[in-house]
Image: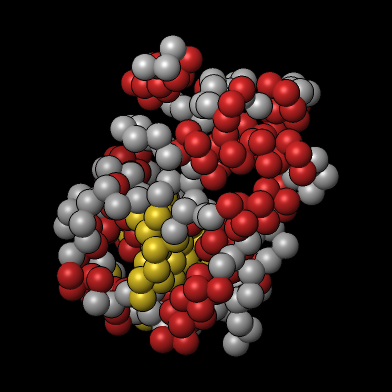
Amino acid sequence: MIKFQGSDQYVATPDLMLAVNAAVTLTRPLLIKGEPGTGKTMLAEEVASALKMPLLQWHIKSTTKAQQGLYEYDAVSRLRDSQLAGVEDSARVRDIHNYIVKGVLWQAFTADQPVALLIDEIDKADIEFPNDLLREIDRMEFYVYETRELVRARHRPVVFITSNNEKELPDAFLRRCFFHYIKFPEADTMRAIVDVHFPGLKQELLAAALKTFYDIRNLPGLKKKPSTSELLDWLKLLVAEDIPLAALHSKDDQVAIPPLVGALLKNEQDVTLFEKLVFMQRHHR
């Protein structure tokens, strides 16, 4: 199988590429953790593209149940159709297969070619959600009780599972995964990421923007630190609004409120904290 070596659209560090290829070799799900906005979801998209596989995505919500990834039996529609059906439609109502809604895992298991499967933000679901998928992900099969059939994977999908660390995942689930934590990019890696999205950006502007960005991230007490995606949004605004380089420079290297700071700080507590720090520095307190 082709090895993942990053892509033109995704800057992957050597340890991340190693983790992806190890998970593929072991045929284990790759559990990816990291701060929001560090490219966990995009990684699955880029790996699928590099390996020339279709990507099926299952975005998890707080109300998502594991059964929905396998299938759902639409009993309500069947009851309604049975009440309204004429002679011509009665055969359709009797066939229960017409009321089985296939989930993402069923689609991945029965695909004609190997696919990549993304289970996105698994920590948003109930604590029992990962346990409810243990057998299916491990054995690559599940039983459909309504139709009395066993669905087995024709080809084992390459599985990516992302988590923002909102909840701890069960040990039994972790044992079945290959784990990688995406560290927040250092300045050199961040420059490479920015260059992918803004190849013509002036180096002076980039240097000043990165200094401001990391200064803000390093402030103690921030409730939410700005992420890579928020840096890219901020740079897009700086370019679109033609913000002069001088607006990003502060006197005596002190922290100053940058233009369009709302792209970086997303709650009032952090904005207030930042403003207080700037005020204290200006008054040498």
> From this viewpoint, is residue 82 visible?
no
Which residue is painted at 44% across and 60% down in the image? 182
Measured from the top left, where is residue 32 in percent x and y?
Answer: 40, 63
Work out which residue is located at the far right of the displayed protein and give it.
200
201 and 72: which is toward the camera: 201
Q: Quadrant of the N terminus?
A: bottom right
Q: Is residue 48 above or below residue 210?
A: below
Which residue is painted at 59% across and 65% down in the image? 12
Measured from the top left, where is residue 93 in percent x and y?
Answer: 35, 54
268 and 10: which is toward the camera: 268
226 and 177: which is toward the camera: 226
Measured from the top left, where is residue 11 in percent x and y?
Answer: 63, 61
Which residue is painted at 18% across and 65% down in the image? 170
8 lies left or right of 124: right
Instruction: Give the quadrant of residue 207.
Output: top right
Q: Is residue 262 above or below residue 121?
A: above
Q: Is residue 7 above or below residue 72?
A: below
Measured from the top left, where is residue 22 in percent x and y?
Answer: 46, 82
Instruction: Give the quadrant of residue 122.
Output: bottom left
> From this viewpoint, is residue 11 visible?
yes
Q: Quadrant of the C terminus?
A: top left
